[in-house]
Image (spheres, helix red, strand yellow):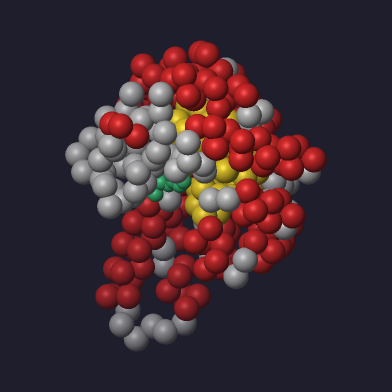
């Protein structure tokens, strides 16, 4: 069932576990993630970046595909279809109009005042449509960095202001994680994380979930993380398996066989993450 993510996030915060957010890139990935999450009886957030949305055709295509798969596969776990890093108010509204049940407005490139004003605009529109909202404070870096810029870490007072004044449902403070592959161990600021959680009581989101050691993820959950975003680790698991399959089966050309060659490896990664986050049997 497609749902607003607020309830599953609040339950995770109160139950001291985290909901997995897996990014989707195509129909097959969506099916693999839905099937494994259903098998694990875990609540699920399907993240769609603006790039992935464009790749798949558009918000309407993604929304229709996800809804149809949920029906055809008889998925019973709660699933939120979530815009990941919406870069503008318009993009968030477009996703909502297409049937997304959750959106992230990423105003991290703006000043706090601008970020707050735009986040509020997204929240007002989202509330009318029963859609949950995530916001970002500080700036979560990308693969080009590999290490987080300490100047880009969220300030506690800014996180508290954005978290409490905007009306959002969950908050992503940049506290040392980066998207993509890490250079060395991430330096997560658990002290700030805990303080932000205590002062806002909002479920917190950790982006750049791939490559963070398991014990750090567990500590993050203790400090208020209720959603872990994972993309790169699924990409690596899938592409490794497909590469091996293609090398060993040079005459295969059926795309179904090629894409499916990554299914078991992806599902294994999904299962491991769900067990690590403790979201199994929480649907
Ligand atoms: P990774 O690609 O590092 O797993 O990050 C995913 C993410 O944070 C999506 O918002």
Residue at 31% across, 69% down: 243
Q: Where is 273 relative to 144, above or below?
A: above
Residue 18 in sight in this render: no
Name the side, left or right, on which 280 lies relative to 98: left
- Give x and y (percent) for residue 166: 63, 29
Name the side, left or right, on which 36 lies relative to 216: right
Residue at 73% across, 46% down: 1
Give the quarter of the image for residue 126: top right
Q: Where is 44 relative to 158, above or below?
A: below
Residue reaching furthest right?
A: 128
Residue 6 in sight in this render: yes
Label total for image: 0
- Give x and y (percent) for residue 225: 48, 27
- Give x and y (percent) for residue 36: 54, 49
Name the side, left or right, on which 243 lies relative to 3: left
Q: Quadrant of the C terminus?
A: top right
Q: Nearer the viewer, residue 243 or 112?
A: 112
Q: Where is 224 relative to 82, above or below?
A: above
Q: Nearer the viewer, residue 104 or 209?
A: 104
Q: Nearer the viewer, residue 98 or 67?
A: 98
Residue at 46% across, 52% down: 267
Give the quarter of the image for residue 60: bottom right
Q: Nearer the viewer, residue 264 or 78?
A: 78
Q: Where is 239 relative to 21, above or below?
A: below
- Give x and y (percent) for residue 31: 58, 59
Residue reaching furthest left?
A: 184
Residue at 48% across, 41% down: 110
């Amino acid at each position: 069932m497609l749902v607003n993510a607020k309830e599953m996030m609040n339950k995770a915060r109160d139950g001291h576990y985290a909901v997995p957010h897996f990014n989707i890139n195509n129909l097959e990935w969506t099916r693999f993630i839905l099937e494994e999450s259903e098998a694990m009886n875990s609540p699920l957030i399907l993240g769609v970046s603006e790039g992935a949305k464009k790749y798949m055709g558009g918000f309407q295509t993604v929304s229709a595909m996800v809804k149809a798969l949920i029906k055809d596969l008889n998925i019973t776990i709660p699933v939120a279809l979530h815009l990941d890093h919406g870069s503008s108010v318009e993009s968030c509204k477009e996703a909502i109009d297409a049937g997304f049940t959750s959106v992230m407005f990423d105003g991290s490139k703006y000043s706090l005042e601008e970020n707050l004003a735009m986040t509020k605009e997204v929240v007002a529109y989202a509330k009318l449509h029963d859609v949950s909202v995530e916001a970002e404070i500080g700036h979560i870096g990308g693969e080009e960095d590999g290490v987080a810029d300490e100047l880009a870490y969220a300030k506690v007072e800014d996180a508290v202001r954005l978290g409490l004044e905007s009306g959002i449902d969950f908050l992503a403070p940049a506290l040392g994680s980066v998207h993509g592959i890490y250079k060395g161990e991430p330096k997560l600021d658990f002290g700030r994380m805990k303080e932000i959680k205590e002062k806002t009581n909002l479920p917190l989101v950790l982006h750049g979930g791939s490559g963070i050691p398991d014990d750090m993820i567990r500590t993050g959950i203790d400090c208020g993380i209720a959603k872990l975003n994972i993309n790169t680790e699924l990409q690596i698991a899938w592409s490794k398996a497909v590469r091996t399959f293609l090398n060993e089966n040079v005459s295969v050309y059926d795309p179904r066989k090629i894409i499916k060659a990554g299914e078991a490896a992806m599902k294994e990664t999904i299962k491991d993450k769900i067990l690590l986050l403790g979201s199994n049997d929480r649907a």
